[in-house]
C-alpha cells in the first residue's frame, strides 16, 4: 500500500510538473506561432507584390552587368574563359542543390541524344557570354548597353527567315532609332577618346581599345542572335523548360570553357597573381560567386515578373531597364559624360519604348482583324458537312 501511495504521489507530481511545463511553454509556443505566421504573411505579401517582382528583375539584370564589368575591367585581366567556367560550376551546383531541396521538381535527365542536339546551342551560348565579357572589358557600360539593342534587329530578321515572322512599320521605326543611337554612341565614345575625356591612356591606345570593343560587340550580336534563335528552334522539339535549358547549357558548356581556358589562357602562378591581386582578391571572388548565382536569380525574377504582371509588362520593363543600366555605368565606372553619350542613351531608351509598343500592337493585330476568307476545312469535316446536306 505504501508503494502504491508513493507511486500515486509520484504520478500526480509528474502530472503537475507536466502541467506547469505546458503552462510555461504555451505562451512561448503561441508567440513562436505568431512570429512564424507573421513571417509567412510578409513573404506571401512580398511574393504577390508586382512592384517587388519588377524591382527584383531590374536589380538582378543591372547588378549582373555591373558585377561582370567589375571583374573583367582590371588592367591585367586575361582569364575570361576561366571566369566563365567558374560561373558555370556555381550555377550548375546551385541547380543541383535546388533540385535536392525540391524547388525544381521536374529537371530533365541528361541524355546523350538530347546533348548532341543541344551542343550547337551551347557553343553559341559560350560564344555569347565570352564575347559579352570581352565587350565589357573594352567598352563602357552605356555603350555596351546601347549596342546590345542591335541584337533585337538581327533576331527579328532571323525570325523572319526561320519562322516566318513579320516586321511592322513601328518596329522598323524603332530599329532606325536603335541604329542611330549606336552611331551616336560610337561617335561620342571616339570623340571622348580623342579629347582624353574619361580615358587615362593616350588617344591612340584609347581608340584601338574601342575598336577592339566594337569588334567583340559585333561578334556578341551575332552569337547572341544565333543562341536565341537556336534555343527557340530546339527548345520545343526537346520539350525543355527554363531550368532544363540552364542545366544543359552549363553542363555542356563547362568542358568547352575549361578546354578553351587551358589552350588559350596562361594558368601560371605569376599570371594568376596578376589577375587576382591580393588587395582585390576577396572582392573578385565574391563577384564571381554572385555572377554564378546571378543566373539563377535572373531566371527566378524573370519568371516572377511575368507571373505577377504580364509578358507585355515584362517586355516593357526589359526595355526601360536600359536607362538605369546605362546610368549605373556612369555612376560606378566613371564612364565619360558628354552631350553625345547622353543623347545616345536617350535615343536607345526611346527606341526601346517604340519597340515595346510596336510588339504589343503586333500581338493585338490578329485579334482586331476580322477573317476575310474561310479557313481551310479538313477532309473529314467536309465529309461530315456533305452528309448533313444529304
Image (cartoon, helix red, strand yellow):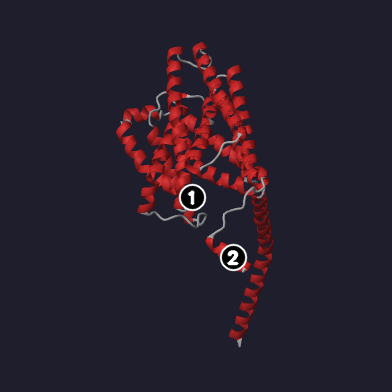
Q: Secondary structure at mark 1?
A: helix
Using the rendered image of the protein, determine whether residue 23 is visible from the camera's viewpoint: yes
Q: Which one is nearer the viewer's eye here, 302 or 240? A: 240
Please provide percent x and percent y for residue 251.
Answer: 39, 47
Q: Which one is nearer the viewer's eye here, 236 or 140? A: 236
Q: CA distance from mark 2 to mark 1?
A: 49 Å
The mark lying in front, picked from 2 and 1, is 2
Q: Earlier in the sequence, mark 2 or mark 1?
A: 1
Q: Which one is nearer the viewer's eye here, 251 or 32? A: 251
Q: Residue at x 41, y 56 (%)?
A: 109
Please provide percent x and percent y for residue 297.
Answer: 53, 44
Q: Is residue 67 above or below residue 41?
A: above
Q: Secondary structure at mark 2?
A: helix
Q: Which residue is mark 1?
A: 243
Q: Is residue 376 above or below residue 209?
A: below
Q: Which residue is mark 2?
A: 386
Q: Is residue 145 above or below residue 201?
A: below
Quadrant of the snapshot with the N terminus: bottom right
Packing grade of label 2 (10 A; few <14, some 14-19, many >=20) is few
Of all residues, the one furthest to the bottom in this rendering is 1
Q: Quadrant of residue 18?
A: bottom right
Amino acid at each position: 500500500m505504501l508503494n502504491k501511495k508513493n507511486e500515486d504521489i509520484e504520478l500526480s507530481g509528474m502530472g503537475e510538473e507536466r502541467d506547469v511545463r505546458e503552462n510555461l511553454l504555451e505562451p512561448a509556443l503561441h508567440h513562436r506561432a505568431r512570429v512564424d505566421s507573421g513571417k509567412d504573411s510578409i513573404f506571401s505579401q512580398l511574393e504577390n507584390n508586382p512592384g517587388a517582382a519588377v524591382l527584383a528583375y531590374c536589380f538582378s539584370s543591372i547588378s549582373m552587368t555591373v558585377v561582370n564589368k567589375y571583374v573583367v575591367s582590371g588592367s591585367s585581366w586575361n582569364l575570361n574563359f576561366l571566369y566563365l567556367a567558374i560561373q558555370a560550376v556555381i550555377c550548375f551546383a546551385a541547380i543541383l542543390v535546388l533540385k535536392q531541396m525540391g524547388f525544381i521538381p521536374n529537371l530533365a535527365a541528361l541524355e546523350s541524344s538530347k546533348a548532341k542536339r543541344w551542343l550547337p546551342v551551347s557553343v553559341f551560348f559560350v560564344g555569347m557570354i565570352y564575347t559579352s565579357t570581352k565587350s565589357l572589358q573594352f567598352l563602357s557600360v552605356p555603350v555596351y548597353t546601347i549596342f546590345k539593342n542591335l541584337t533585337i534587329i538581327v533576331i527579328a530578321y532571323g525570325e523572319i527567315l526561320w519562322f516566318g515572322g513579320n516586321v511592322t512599320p513601328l518596329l522598323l521605326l524603332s530599329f532606325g532609332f536603335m541604329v542611330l543611337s549606336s552611331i551616336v554612341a560610337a561617335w561620342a565614345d571616339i570623340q571622348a577618346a580623342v579629347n582624353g575625356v574619361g580615358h587615362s591612356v593616350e588617344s591612340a591606345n584609347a581608340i584601338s581599345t574601342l575598336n577592339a570593343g566594337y569588334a567583340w560587340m559585333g561578334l556578341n550580336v551575332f552569337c547572341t542572335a544565333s543562341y536565341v534563335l537556336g534555343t527557340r528552334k530546339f527548345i520545343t522539339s526537346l520539350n525543355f523548360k527554363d531550368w532544363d535549358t540552364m542545366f544543359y547549357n552549363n553542363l555542356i558548356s563547362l568542358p568547352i570553357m575549361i578546354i578553351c581556358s587551358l589552350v588559350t589562357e596562361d594558368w601560371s602562378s605569376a599570371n594568376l597573381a596578376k589577375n587576382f591581386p591580393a588587395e582585390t582578391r576577396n572582392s573578385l571572388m565574391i563577384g564571381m560567386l554572385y555572377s554564378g548565382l546571378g543566373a539563377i536569380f535572373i531566371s527566378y525574377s524573370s519568371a516572377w515578373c511575368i507571373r505577377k504582371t504580364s509578358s507585355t509588362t515584362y517586355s516593357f520593363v526589359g526595355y526601360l531597364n536600359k536607362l538605369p543600366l546605362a546610368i549605373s555605368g556612369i555612376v560606378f565606372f566613371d564612364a565619360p559624360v558628354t552631350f553625345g553619350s547622353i543623347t545616345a542613351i536617350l535615343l536607345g531608351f526611346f527606341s526601346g519604348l517604340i519597340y515595346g509598343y510596336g510588339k504589343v500592337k503586333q500581338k493585338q493585330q490578329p485579334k482586331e482583324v476580322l477573317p476575310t476568307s474561310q479557313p481551310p476545312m479538313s477532309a473529314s469535316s467536309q465529309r461530315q458537312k456533305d452528309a448533313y446536306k444529304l
